[in-house]
Image (cartoon, rainbow, N blue to C red):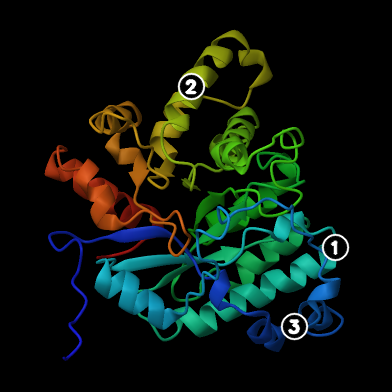
């Protein structure tokens, strides 16, 4: 019997997926082509790779298959043709800030970005990519943005928020934000879920279950980043930048808006750069991805969350190909009760504006 063509899950509107991981397809064998010694040996010989795992059981006792191998053909066939994604926005790796060796992190940063462009963006017109940066050296990160920020298909700068780094609103990173603004690139933050020993290092030590770690790490990393950005006036210093927060869901964002508003009302002298309330900066310049969409017992409560945050502040994401990714068709059911205009904002219009995509 002839194999049937994949059916698009969402056919009535454009779909932009803002969080697709391709690190699994970037095997270290391929990465070595972009590395010189001594850095090539770090990936050719995993026994000396300086990132020990944490010991957390991430696959629920082998109930979840590992691998996450995602090449460009798989993204095109499974995600684009099968799930109906028109514009996949790809990222590479979230663990560079955890590397204790700055020179190695910089070498890997450049290698990952070159491989992303060569393997995924050059041959696929609808693919878009985010430049990964190593926060250990902000000057080198800014140079990387200047090197590749105008390449076709590059639409943002990808910064991991989990790791032993200075909070990302600190003025030492202003050179990174300045470079992103110069190249008209969105700044995209992504937290991680406990893969390595440095994850969630500020609160992780006493937790007994990966359930707890995976519940808390992503929003914690994003909360810390958002508070740091506002406290240090980053949105005011860089008025043309837009900021996107991936893989922490939605509900933490309204909480942070209101909590920061209260603190700001009492401590304005601590925040002399701000010209607006924290909520105004969040609503005007910041975006939050749907994945992982929370699962209330009453699904109608999702609409209350969207109303609190505002559909104009939400972008769609699947987190493909990770085991807990959100299927576009399943997530779209939660949006069935929204006005069509709001649904389209979430599914593609907001992301098109932020990332400069012309559907």
Q: Is residue 276 visible?
A: no
Cα separation, mark 2 vs mark 3, equals: 46 Å
Task: Work out whether residue 321 or residue 335 is closer to the camera in this orientation and state it.
Answer: 321
Which residue is labeled 2 in the image? 277
In front: label 1 or label 2 = 1
Left or right of 146: which side holds 104? right
As measured in the structure, the alpha-carbon distance from the residue carrying label 1 to the one carrying label 2 is 39 Å
Q: Determine the residue positioned at 76% across, 66% down.
A: 105
Q: Which residue is mark 3?
A: 35
Image quadrant where residue 19 sits: bottom left
Left/right placement of residue 145 relative to residue 276 reads right
Classify residue 33 by image quadrant.
bottom right
Measured along the vertical axis of the image, is residue 128 above or below residue 276?
Answer: below
- The residue that mark 1 highlights is 101
Of the 4 image quadrants, the one containing the C terminus is bottom left
Residue 43 visible in this rendered orientation of the protein: yes
Tag 1–tag 2 contact (CB < 8 Å): no
* Mark 2 or mark 3: whose residue is earlier in sequence: 3
**Which x, y percent locates residue 262?**
52, 12
**What SS does tag 2 mark?**
loop
Q: Given this view, does label 2 or label 3 mark the residue nearer the observer?
A: 3
Give the crowd class for mark 1: few <14, some 14-19, many >=20 residues within 10 Å: few
| Residue 258, percent from left and from top | 46, 19
Dot 3 lies on which element? loop
Query: Around disc 2, counting alpha carbons within 10 Å, would you say few (fewer than 14), some (14 to 19), or many (20 or more)?
Result: some
- Left or right, 332 with reference to 313: left
């Amino acid at each position: 019997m002839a194999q049937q063509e994949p059916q698009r899950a969402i056919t009535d509107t454009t779909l932009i997926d803002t969080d697709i991981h391709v690190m699994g397809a970037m095997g270290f064998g391929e990465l070595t082509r972009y590395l010189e010694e001594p850095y090539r040996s770090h990936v050719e010989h995993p026994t000396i790779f300086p990132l020990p795992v944490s010991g957390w059981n991430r696959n629920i006792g082998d109930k979840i298959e590992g691998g996450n191998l995602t090449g460009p053909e798989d993204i095109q066939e499974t995600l684009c043709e099968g799930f109906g994604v028109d514009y996949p926005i790809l990222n590479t790796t979230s663990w560079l800030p955890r590397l204790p060796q700055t020179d190695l992190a910089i070498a890997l940063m450049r290698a990952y970005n070159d491989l992303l462009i060569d393997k995924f963006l050059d041959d696929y017109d609808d693919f878009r990519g985010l430049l990964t940066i190593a926060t250990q050296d902000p000057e080198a990160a800014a140079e990387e943005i200047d090197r590749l920020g105008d390449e076709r298909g590059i639409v943002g700068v990808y910064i991991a928020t989990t790791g032993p780094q200075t909070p990302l609103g600190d003025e030492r990173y202003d050179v990174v934000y300045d470079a992103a603004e110069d190249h008209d690139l969105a700044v995209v933050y992504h937290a991680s879920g406990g893969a390595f020993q440095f994850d969630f290092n500020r609160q992780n030590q006493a937790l007994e279950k990966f359930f707890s770690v995976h519940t808390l790490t992503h929003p914690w990393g994003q909360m810390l980043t958002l508070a740091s950005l506002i406290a240090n006036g980053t949105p005011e210093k860089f008025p043309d930048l837009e900021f996107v927060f991936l893989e922490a869901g939605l509900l933490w964002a309204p909480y942070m808006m209101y909590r920061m508003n209260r603190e700001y009302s009492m401590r304005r002298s601590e925040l002399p750069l701000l010209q607006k309330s924290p909520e105004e900066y969040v609503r005007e310049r910041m975006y939050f991805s749907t994945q992982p969409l929370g699962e209330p017992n009453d699904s109608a409560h999702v609409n209350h969350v969207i109303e609190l945050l505002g559909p104009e502040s939400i972008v769609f994401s699947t987190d493909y190909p990770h085991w807990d990714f959100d299927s576009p068709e399943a997530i779209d059911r939660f949006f069935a009760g929204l006005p069509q205009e709001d649904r389209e904002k979430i599914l593609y219009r907001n992301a098109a504006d932020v990332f400069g995509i012309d559907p």
